[in-house]
Image (spheres, rainbow, N blue to C red):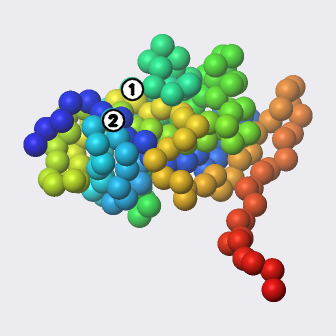
Amino acid sequence: GRLPMTELRHGWVVSAESNGRTITGIVAPWGVPGNTSAGRWRLRAGSIRLPEPLSRVKLLGGGHDWETPVGYATAARDTPAGLEMTFKIARTADGDKALLEAAELIRDAFSVELNNLATEGDEITAGDLTAVAQLAVPAYSDARVTNVAAQRHKGEEMPETTPPETEPETEPE
């Protein structure tokens, strides 16, 4: 069946660079149940249709706010994990904020906006990508940032950050 436009809260930012002013990450993981605005759905691998030109896909800052685009898509590729995309970030105050919030792990998650969905059971088999939102909390708690590289003000380098590995909690012996 077909569903109206919906948002799927997915993947995490894996890289944010201000020298190239880009943010890259998995925007939609394949085959994993996610909590969407239309219920619990999985995305079939390769199910997201991309527009031509790809720059029509905007990155929305501050969640699903269509009034605050902060960038546009420059690259997309299917990976075994999901749809990976790169966004060129605008040289605006909102763009600067988007880069900073990704680098500081504040808004380091993505949510895709899809139109014209086709489904089978609990699986989305096709959908047209219209936008991607940068969020604080996605549907998948085990997804994590793997690398953030950015610059601070006036060319001052920010050290690369990699989140610490979390060890399982154990009782002392």
Q: Nearer the viewer, mark 2 or mark 1?
A: 2
Measuring from the top left, give residue 19's x and y in whole percent. Answer: 74, 35
Where is 137 relative to 155, above or below?
below
Q: Give the residue at x 72% y 65%.
A: 165
Where is 159 relative to 102, above or below?
below
* Residue 169, quarter of picture: bottom right
Mark 2 and mark 1 lie on one chain; the one further toward the N terminus is 2
The label on residue 56 is: 1
Tag 2: residue type? Ser
Residue 78 visible to the viewer: no
The label on residue 37 is: 2
* Residue 135, quarter of picture: top right
Give the residue at the far left of this rendering. 1
How packed mark 1 is, by other alpha carbons closer than 10 Å (few <14, some 14-19, many 20 or more), is some
Where is 7 relative to 120, above or below?
above
How packed mark 2 is, by other alpha carbons closer than 10 Å (few <14, some 14-19, many 20 or more), is few
* Residue 107, quarter of picture: top right
Tell me: 118 left or right of 159: left
Contact between labelled residues 1 and 2, with CB atoms less than 8 Å apart: no
Q: Give the residue at x 16% y 54%.
A: 121
Q: Give the residue at x 23% y 49%.
A: 124
